[in-house]
Amino acid sequence: MHKKNIISIFAETNHFVIMKIQQIIFCLLTASMLASAAMAQGNRADYRVVPLPDRIDGIMSADFKLTEQCLVNYPTGNRDMERNATMLSEYIEDLSGLHLSTRPTLNEKDRAGNITLHFDPKMESDEGYRITVTARSVEICGKTAAGVFHGIQTLRKSIPVGQATAINLPAAQVVSNPRFSYRGMHLDCVRHFFPVSTVKRYIDLLALHGMNRLHWHLTDDQGWRVEIKKYPRLTEVGGWRNGTTLGHNSPVNDGIRYGGFYTQEEIRDIVRYAADRYITIIPEIDMPGHMVAAMTAYPELGCTGGPYEVWTLWGVTDDILCVGKDHTLQFVKDVLDEVIQLFPSEYIHIGGDESPRVRWQECPLCQQRIRDLGLKANDKQSAEALLQGWFTTQVQQYLTEHGRRIIGWDELLGCDVNTSATIMSWRGAEPGAEGANLGHDVIMTPVGPLYFDYYQTSKTWNEPMAFGGCNTLKKVYDFEPVAADLPADKRSHIIGVQANVWTEYITCEPQIQYQVLPRMAALAEVQWLPSEQKDYQDFKARLPRLAEIYKHYGWTYRAKSLVHEEDEDQPNQ
Ligand code: ACM
Ligand code: ZN
């Protein structure tokens, strides 16, 4: 009895202990399953990035597990794809800590368990991409290495930011083709000068957002920023100004000598850095206006002969190049000779904006040129406007002989330049529509809403000083570059969209980033998505994940734009 009792007590205790152990194991298992489910969720890629791909079609397959065992394959012997593979590996390591090696291979069998970059000549557009993910492999393909690069950016943006030992990539086919072939950002490095490192990081922003053109504003009244060997005074003298006005053209000058320029070696380095990211740099040498820095260095370039002073104010000055002198034309050609050596871009931007003609009206040489050319004022154009057209055509012909094409600001529409000039529409979208109707190719960069030096809110009191206006994130997102009433046969003349960043009031890199982020994200969807696919609320829901990447790289951005909807009660300009 005693013995039996002891046994039974022991058995009961044993049973109790076993039950407890079972309960603990159950709890542990549940907890670990929940934790790993949460982990899987937290470490699961999401292809709904910015800009949103055209299509994301699920595939019946388990997730692909991305770990350090995976390789990034690229076609043997292809330097562009090798660089693409290296960049993808670096992006993944930046964002997750996972280090993936790269490997050249043409062997299909090597795809299992790895990421493979390859070409598909049958793809729809040059810059489109297709990402195919199954449990077995990941493939990123494009017709060109640029297309593959855009696919790489999408994969990069889809993975969660944070240290990981593995990332689950859902099985899917992701396809996208950009709506516009010209997808640009502009940067003014004259009004304020930025070091090479800042320009390169700006190029990094373009790459992340799927853009392919950097319009680089290099010369203006307030400074000449590109070394020209034949005219060393352009940078020695024209690269520096005696102080800068405070605020919006106040009478107060800070009295601090300010300037800088890029050597030809630095420019080549930047051009290469951009090209590695499939971004073409289009230099702007603004003429015949916005030339006071050059005229300070070489006063004979102006109608009065000077003396001139590199401008310390903002705005538009009456002093422009004298086009009555043959010497001026020779100067322009000499400068362009060096510019085209530095920039392989087919397009060279020759400005043409804001050129008052009062000096020409008074200059005997310019008036003589008008007479020699037989230019006659008509209902719409003064003889001086036609003189700007003649000058622009001379420059255009010179660049054409050298295999290049011009872009000019929309003022050129009033000067009778021929339709092989591409027009950049900035004084609204209407000049762009007019240009397209005339047969010009057009890039849309209207002040409203695509001047990113404008405020992002009407409540400006807590904002860094900006030009003015109010170009909210939503206004950028809602911008439609092709006017509804543009005839069908003219619509293809709208080749692209770009936002401009003038830097009168932008003095440092974080301020550049603050002005452009996150508005670049909205612009990227304008540039990539068919208008019927755009959805602002959906975009806003996807934006925080992109902002995680901004944060990760330490980029400054306007976080408020992610949360608040700015009111729309302010006009654009
Ligand atoms: C411009 O903003 N003057 C093109
Ligand atoms: Zn003149």
Image: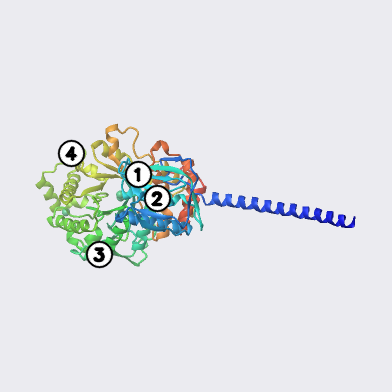
Q: Is residue 189 left or right of residue 56?
A: left
Residue under label 1: 128
Q: Are marks 2 and 1 in contact (CB under 8 Å)?
A: no
**Looking at the image, is mark 4 or mark 3 earlier in the sequence?**
3
Q: What type is the residue that disc 3 sits on?
A: Thr
Q: CA distance from mark 2 to mark 1?
A: 21 Å
Residue under label 4: 378
Q: Position of residue 59 (x, y in %)?
A: 46, 40
Q: Secondary structure at mark 4?
A: loop
Q: What type is the residue that disc 2 sits on?
A: Arg
Q: Is residue 19 left or right of residue 548?
A: right
Q: Residues within 10 Å of mark 1 (few under 14, many from 20)?
A: many
Q: CA distance from mark 3 to mark 2?
A: 53 Å
Residue under label 3: 235
Q: Position of residue 97 (x, y in %)?
A: 47, 59
Image position of 220 with respect to 412: above or below: below
Q: Give the residue furthest to the left.
A: 372
Q: Residues within 10 Å of mark 2 (few under 14, many from 20)?
A: many
Q: CA distance from mark 4 to mark 1?
A: 47 Å
Report whether residue 165 is seen: yes
